[in-house]
Image (tube, grey):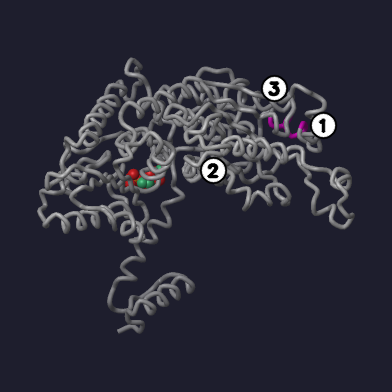
């Protein structure tokens, strides 16, 4: 599929990077900053209001030069162009990958199977906008004539994480007279807690499922239908006023009882974890309004254009992708902590976990061969400053190298006394402490007794990126998400893996389908699993009070 793709570890640049790593692996950030007093100004890049300081990475000019060479030798340019022109780069599912079309302006033309998909994208956006306006203004009434005040999004994975993250991130811009809830887990508690204080007459459910077959979502949707009908005198006509669907599967939507007039479509070239700006984002649009939603799309598009056109040395996603790869494959860092210093981004790390790890948690290359080096690092994180009182200890003094992405904004959306300056002081302090640490001499000079010195030493030399923007707006959120989408793509392209499938989630799903009847059947089932699984099933059946012995 790609005649320019060369195995990463067979490239001359990989070989050179290995040798280069040998030379510089002892270099300390302290020294690198002393050697180049302008390093902190030089190793920065800005695009569309997002400023990245990557100077606190363990790199030199030579590292950067070689990493860019690696990208070139692996055909990254070809891969980027391939995605943007709609090639079927998701080869295991034979699909194009065109989330970039979801945020393309009306004037753009992006062809899939000979058809420009941009007009379809905008037709759905217009339909979403019209619906959102009607719900937000109260023109859309529930079955009993009451206006809708509560929106419950039912979806999971890509049909949940993006919507929740975006709602939380953009809550400042949301209609505060409305309540938004998100139900994803098959655990009945999720549904029960999300609905316990809601009035069915004022509640609208969005059933968000690309396939409309996902077990968790369909089970929750059926419970929601029962809950709504129970509260609305059982009249099946109520479903049409209280349920809408976001899906690619009109047949299943209609079989569920949702009028396909109230269905918002998308396409198989939109992957679940890349869908928050498609109709899957309907809850986001209902919360923040169509204008803000379009501003978010515009932010995405600006980052897309930057990614598509900027030279690699100045390309934010490319640089961050290459740095992550350097930290992972050369410095041996297995995880990356994402640390947003903004409470509104509290679900951003969870969102990124799916984006990064479902995309790049792969063990074979596009041609089915075992990869020759580690693929996706583990992404995790918590908003600052909470993490500082928890796991930062390990990042500062533990035995593992954990590169950090700090994300912060110059302006708070909720200015309150000194809060914001203190918050920002913490961002800057943390990356400074990680990079430069504190030597034994410095600790001793403070009068620390000798026996305590080793406990109070900070080695430093721990890499981090700092991302800084003016303030968290819908547009900036779009740019930020697109930045991470594309840096995931860059790493995947270099590893020559498919970022866009997720076969690893299938086995557990299939086994669960087989186990459900074994838990539900009244008579003791013949179990054919391993002894541990058999025993656990029997123990569960016993605990819930179903017969144990074969009858
Ligand atoms: C994401 C995955 C996955 C998907 C969910 C929900 O990239 O494909 O997380 O979004 O399994 O799928 P449905 O939207 O089809 O219910």
Q: Secondary structure at mark 3?
A: helix
Left or right of 23 in this view: 40:
left
* Membership of 16 in magenta stretch: yes
Label 1 packing within 10 angstroms: few (<14), some (14-19), many (20+): few
Left or right of 252 in this view: 174:
right
Q: Residue at x 77, y 31 (%)?
A: 20
Label 3 packing within 10 angstroms: few (<14), some (14-19), many (20+): few
Q: Determine if the C-beta at disc 2 is less than 8 A from ligand 1.
A: no
Quadrant of the rendered image containing residue 285: top left
Residue at the disc numbered 1: 31
Residue 329 marker: none
User: Bounds of the magenta span?
Assistant: 14-20
Residue at the disc numbered 2: 364
* Membership of 43 in magenta stretch: no
Across and down, in percent, residue 496 comes to: 55, 35
Displayed-image quarter of ligand 1:
top left
Q: Secondary structure at mark 1?
A: helix
Is the Cβ of the residue at disc 2 closer than 8 Å to that at disc 3?
no
Residue at the disc numbered 3: 41
The residue sitting at the front extreme is 417
**Quarter of the rendering occupied by the C terminus:** bottom left
Is the Cβ of the residue at disc 3 closer than 8 Å to that at disc 1?
no
Left or right of 4 in this view: 150:
left
Across and down, in percent, residue 269 comes to: 36, 33
Across and down, in percent, residue 466 comes to: 62, 32
Is the magenta region chiefly helix, strand or loop? helix
């Amino acid at each position: 599929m790609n005649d320019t793709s060369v195995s990463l570890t067979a490239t001359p640049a990989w070989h050179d990077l290995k040798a280069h790593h040998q030379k510089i692996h002892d270099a300390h950030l302290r020294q690198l900053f002393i050697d180049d007093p302008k390093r902190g100004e030089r190793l920065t890049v800005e695009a569309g209001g997002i400023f990245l300081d990557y100077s606190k990475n363990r790199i030199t000019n030579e590292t950067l030069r070689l990493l860019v060479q690696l990208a070139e030798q692996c055909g990254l340019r070809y891969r980027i162009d391939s995605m943007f022109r709609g090639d079927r780069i998701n080869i295991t599912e034979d699909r194009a990958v065109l989330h970039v079309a979801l945020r393309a302006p009306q004037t753009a033309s992006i062809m899939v199977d000979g058809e420009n998909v941009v007009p379809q994208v905008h037709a759905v956006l217009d339909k979403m906008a019209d619906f959102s306006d009607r719900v937000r203004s109260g023109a859309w009434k529930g079955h009993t004539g009451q206006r809708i005040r509560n929106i419950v999004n039912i979806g999971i994975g890509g049909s949940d994480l993006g919507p929740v993250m975006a709602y939380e991130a953009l809550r400042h811009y949301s209609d505060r007279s409305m309540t938004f809830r998100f139900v994803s887990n098959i655990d009945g508690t999720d549904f029960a807690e999300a609905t316990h204080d809601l009035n069915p007459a004022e509640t609208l459910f969005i059933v968000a499922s690309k396939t409309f077959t996902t077990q968790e979502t369909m089970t929750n949707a059926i419970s929601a239908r029962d809950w709504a009908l129970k509260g609305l005198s059982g009249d099946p006509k109520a479903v049409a006023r209280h349920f809408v669907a976001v899906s690619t599967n009109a047949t299943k939507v209609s079989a569920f009882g949702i009028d396909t007039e109230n269905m918002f479509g998308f396409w198989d070239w939109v992957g679940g974890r890349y869908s928050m700006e498609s109709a899957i984002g309907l809850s986001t649009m209902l919360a923040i309004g169509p204008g803000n939603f379009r501003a978010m799309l515009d932010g995405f598009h600006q980052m897309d254009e930057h990614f598509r056109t900027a030279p690699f040395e100045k390309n934010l996603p490319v640089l961050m992708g290459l740095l992550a790869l350097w930290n992972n494959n050369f410095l041996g860092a297995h995880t990356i902590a994402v640390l947003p210093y903004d409470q509104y981004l509290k679900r951003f790390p969870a969102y990124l976990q799916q984006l990064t790890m479902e995309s790049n948690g792969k063990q074979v290359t596009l041609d089915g061969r075992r990869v020759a080096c580690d693929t996706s690092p583990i992404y995790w994180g918590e908003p600052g400053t909470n993490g500082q009182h928890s796991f930062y200890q390990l990042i500062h003094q533990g035995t593992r190298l954990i590169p950090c992405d700090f994300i912060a904004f110059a302006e708070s959306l909720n200015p309150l006394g000194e809060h914001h300056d203190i918050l920002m002081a913490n961002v800057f302090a943390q990356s400074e402490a990680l990079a430069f640490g504190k030597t034994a001499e410095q600790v001793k000079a403070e009068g620390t007794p000798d026996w305590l010195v080793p406990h109070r030493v900070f080695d430093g030399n721990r890499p981090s990126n700092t991302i800084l923007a003016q303030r968290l707006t819908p547009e900036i959120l779009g740019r930020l998400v697109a930045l991470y989408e594309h840096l995931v793509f860059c790493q995947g392209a270099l590893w020559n893996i498919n970022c866009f499938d997720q076969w690893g989630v299938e086995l557990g799903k299939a086994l669960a389908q087989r186990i459900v009847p074994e838990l539900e059947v009244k008579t003791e089932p013949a179990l054919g699993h391993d002894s541990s699984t058999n025993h656990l099933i029997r123990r569960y059946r016993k605990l819930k009070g179903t017969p144990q012995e074969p009858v």
